[in-house]
Amino acid sequence: MNRFNDMIEHMHMPQEQYQQMKESLARQAGTKKNAMPGWRRYAVAAAFALCLFGTAVTAYAAVRYQWFQVFFDNGDQETEIMQELMAKASAKTVTAENENYKFTVLNHLYSKEQQMGLILCSFHFLKEHQTYLDVMDREHNTVILKKNRVVDGQTFLMEDTAKTDRCLQFNVNSASGKESISANTKYYTGEMAEDGGYLIGIRYNLDMEKKTEQMPQLIVSLENAGDIEDKLKVSLPQSGDVTCIRFVSEENPDNVFVISPLGVTLTITCDKKEDADNMFDHDIFENEVLGGMKLVMEDQAEPSGDFGQGYTTSVLVGETETTYTWYVQKEFTNYVDVSQIAYIELSGEKYRK
């Protein structure tokens, strides 16, 4: 029975229901102890628990397993760092709803230093409307979600020739209004949430004028939904802060990487060029000709670039007659144990702790 006691110890449920489960499992195993082998007792107990308390088990599974698989291609590899992130993520649920739509925030994780966050939520179309939600699948292709239908992006474009359907958007902003969103990516892996809604992962990056010591109060809202009564917005539950590691350039100490399992941020100063169009070259991270970004791990002789094809955004934060200074945010779609990084290379330049 130990393995099932351990399992229900981690479930979130009312105390009375929790005690009933433990007692039922104990009775089930005890009455059949002499009648069947141990492995069958465990199987019966597990089936009993799943039948009676499927909702609680599903909720546990959603939090523990689906959390990172939504955001990371290798998110099924459970590690100590991943367990730490799970512990820091808020599990408090909050719901926004009107007559047409409903969404429930299931989990929220935020890196204050990087201004990057992850939201796991359930989303419902309550009525049939000419609206849709565009998301990314596991292969990072566009998928369209409607009330009772999931269709790939190309098929939807061919069908919606009149452009009559309206695209819904999730938005994250601070309650103070001093922060604005600089990126917002939605992921859907085909899983449904416990309440029957689409299980959606939302990544967001904020562009804050000044970083604050305290966690900002953030609000998530569904936009373009005709929400004139402001019912489709809720405050995000506070999460524990994600631990970050700083890497400083050997050549220019003002150039700094801040890295966590969520991704990297980079503050970097670049020389102006005659043909520059006031845009940061995002290809610098993947382009091997430009040198690319490489993570050199403690136990590897060769650097790795296997951090996935996540989105990159950049904001101009400083300028002189000869230079631009950029603040860059890049999300990881492959989970990386950043505690094992010895140093980072970018275009041949080394960044060390």
Image (tube, rainbow, N blue to C red):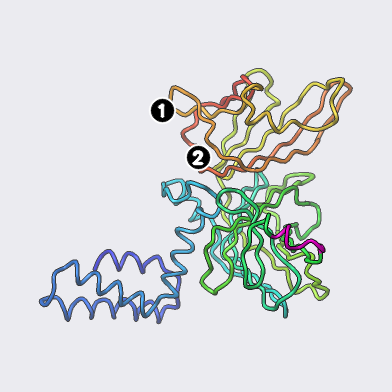
Q: Quadrant of the C terminus?
A: top right
Quarter of the image for residue 259 reads top right
Q: Is residue 322 above or below residue 54?
A: above
What range of the chain is rendered magenta? 156-163
Quarter of the image for residue 144 reads bottom right
Dot 1 corresponds to which residue? Answer: 299
Dot 2 corresponds to which residue? Answer: 336
Toward the viewer: 13 or 96?
A: 96
Answer with left or right where residue 114 lies relative to residue 335: right
Residue 144 magenta-highlighted: no
Distance from the alpha carbon under mark 1 to that under mark 2: 14 Å
Q: Quadrant of the N terminus?
A: bottom left
* Marking on residue 97: none
Amino acid type of disc 2?
Val
Write the residue at 63% across / 20% down.
349
Q: Is residue 321 above or below residue 102?
A: above
Q: Position of residue 38 (x, y in %)?
A: 16, 68
Answer with left or right where residue 174 lies relative to residue 195: right
Mark 1, secondary structure of its residue: loop
Please tell me how crowded label 2 is: few (under 14), some (14-19), or many (20+) other residues with Cα within 10 Å. many
Toward the viewer: 342 or 143?
A: 143
